[in-house]
Image: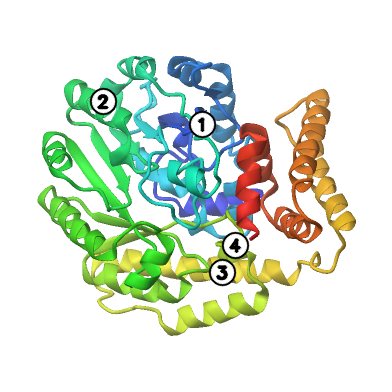
């Protein structure tokens, strides 16, 4: 592993020689109140709002321990997602890459964070097929048929931000749909007042655009990225329920013009899935033609959307298709070069899934055998983890087993087998992160929908 870490660090473009810059420059606030250093480490939390203040999270002992570990290229404190990618040589897929640009903000003498990542609400006008009730209040109401989750952020949270806003170089906002979350507008106004040069980046689904938003974009340093998962009307509207493809294209054109006006690269965020893999080359061609940089997001959940859950023969079919239809035109353009690297990285990722599929021997096992294998997987993780003392390991193991037992008891045997097959194949650390930091209800809804 150490040799792989050295190779990865040598491949990186930042000058700090740190395997990841996120713990030294950023905080992320999730819709459930969790305070993290990035969007990948969901297990090692710095705290939970409102029980933990922003000040306590940034200056606390847990943060110091994590920074010390990263200084020593130790990825055992919740950094399993990146650790796994590095071990497999998938350097372009390592989550830490997304924080390399913070090198330009990083100052070892600055004791304050320079980037905040906000996910403060779940108001959304869409019910995307790969999403869930935690991130879309409409899904919670219409698909899960349950009372809404209530994000914990309030006016006190905004007041706590005042101490940090003057030091920020960037503030990111995701959703739900950021333009439908009232609290975001209050924070944007505070940033414009206290730190007008701070870059405000928004990831929108591109379906909300009105005069209020257009005026707002002229007041601050706003950089808008758009997400879409289909290049044709049929695929786009099948995935993004409630969206209209024609309206989306009109809004996308507006955001592209806004980006050109402020000399900003337009980004389009795309989730390759079971439902749209056949449009991947078309999406890249569209972005190349319009000088848009494409950002792919690996769908790891739910399993009925995630490519990595497909059997070997289907993954091989997809890989062959992507290789045959590689959009290499206009390769001299800078954006197209970047997009081509992204495209080849996606093919490499699928190749790795194919290799993992070859070694998966769980498909013929019974419910009891699968449950025992999953419990062994959990036990092995806790036995080898450096995050807990011995007594906590025992307690957490029993609690996690109990949560899964509770979820399985709500399902028939066939559905339980599907869930267990998924859990055994899935990243252990991310499973535990969900079990320990989400309610059983949230995990249950995701699993039940994900195996249908």
Q: Where is residue 440 in the image (x, y as percent from the top left)?
A: 67, 37
User: Up-down: is 334 above or below 207?
Assistant: below
Residue 350: which disc?
3
Q: Where is residue 53 in the image (x, y as percent from the top left)?
A: 47, 16
Report whether 233 appears left or right of 390.
left
Q: How far apart are marks 1 and 3 (CA)?
A: 31 Å
Q: Nearer the viewer, residue 233 or 289?
A: 233
Q: Can residue 75 be seen in this view?
A: no
Categorize mark 4 by other alpha carbons within 10 Å: few (<14), some (14-19), many (20+): many
Residue 186: which disc?
2
Residue wearing tag 4: 304
Q: Residue at x 72, y 55 (%)?
A: 419
Q: Which of 13 and 346 is in front in this view?
A: 346
Disc with the residue nearer the chain's start (1 vs 3): 1
Which structural element holds mark 1?
loop
Which structural element holds mark 2?
helix
Disc with the residue nearer the chain's start (1 vs 2): 1
Report whether 212 appears left or right of 39.
left
Residue 240, image quadrant: bottom left
């Amino acid at each position: 592993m150490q040799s792989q870490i050295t190779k990865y660090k040598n491949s990186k473009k930042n000058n700090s020689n740190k395997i990841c810059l996120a713990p030294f420059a950023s905080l992320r606030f999730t819709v459930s109140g969790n305070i993290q250093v990035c969007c990948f480490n969901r297990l090692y939390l710095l705290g939970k709002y409102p029980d933990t203040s922003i000040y306590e999270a940034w200056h606390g002992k847990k943060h110091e321990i994590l920074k010390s570990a990263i200084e020593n290229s130790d990825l055992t404190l919740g950094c399993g997602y990146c650790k796994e990618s590095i071990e497999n040589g998938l350097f372009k897929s390592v989550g830490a890459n997304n924080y390399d640009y913070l090198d330009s903000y990083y100052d070892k003498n600055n004791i304050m964070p320079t980037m905040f990542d906000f996910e403060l609400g779940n108001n959304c006008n869409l019910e995307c097929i790969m999403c869930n009730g935690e991130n879309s209040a409409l899904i919670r109401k219409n698909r899960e048929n349950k009372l809404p989750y209530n994000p914990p952020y309030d006016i006190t949270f905004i007041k706590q931000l005042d101490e940090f806003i003057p030091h920020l170089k960037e503030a990111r906002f995701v959703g739900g749909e950021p333009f439908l979350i009232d609290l975001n507008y209050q924070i944007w106004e505070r940033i414009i007042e206290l730190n007008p040069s701070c870059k405000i980046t928004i990831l929108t689904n591109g379906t909300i655009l009105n005069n209020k938003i257009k005026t707002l974009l002229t007041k601050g340093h706003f950089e808008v990225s758009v997400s879409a998962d289909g290049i044709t009307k049929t695929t786009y509207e099948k995935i993004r329920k409630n969206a209209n493809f024609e309206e989306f294209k009109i809004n996308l054109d507006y955001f592209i013009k806004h980006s050109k006006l402020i000399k900003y690269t337009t980004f389009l965020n795309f989730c390759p899935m079971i439902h749209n893999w056949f449009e991947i080359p078309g999406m890249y061609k569209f972005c190349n033609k319009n000088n848009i940089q494409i950002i792919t997001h690996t769908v790891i959940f739910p399993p009925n959307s995630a490519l990595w859950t497909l059997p070997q023969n289907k993954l091989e079919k997809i890989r062959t298709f992507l290789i045959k239809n590689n959009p290499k035109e206009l390769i001299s353009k800078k954006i197209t070069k970047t997009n081509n690297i992204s495209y080849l990285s996606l093919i490499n990722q699928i190749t790795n899934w194919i290799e993992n599929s070859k070694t998966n021997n769980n498909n013929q096992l019974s419910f009891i055998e699968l449950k025992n294998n999953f419990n062994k997987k959990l036990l092995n993780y806790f036995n080898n983890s450096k995050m807990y003392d011995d007594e906590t390991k025992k307690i957490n193991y029993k609690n996690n087993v109990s949560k899964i037992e509770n979820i399985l008891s709500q399902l028939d045997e066939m559905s339980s087998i599907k869930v267990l097959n998924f859990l055994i194949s899935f990243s252990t650390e991310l499973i535990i992160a969900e079990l320990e930091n989400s309610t059983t209800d949230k995990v249950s809804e995701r699993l039940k929908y994900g195996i249908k």
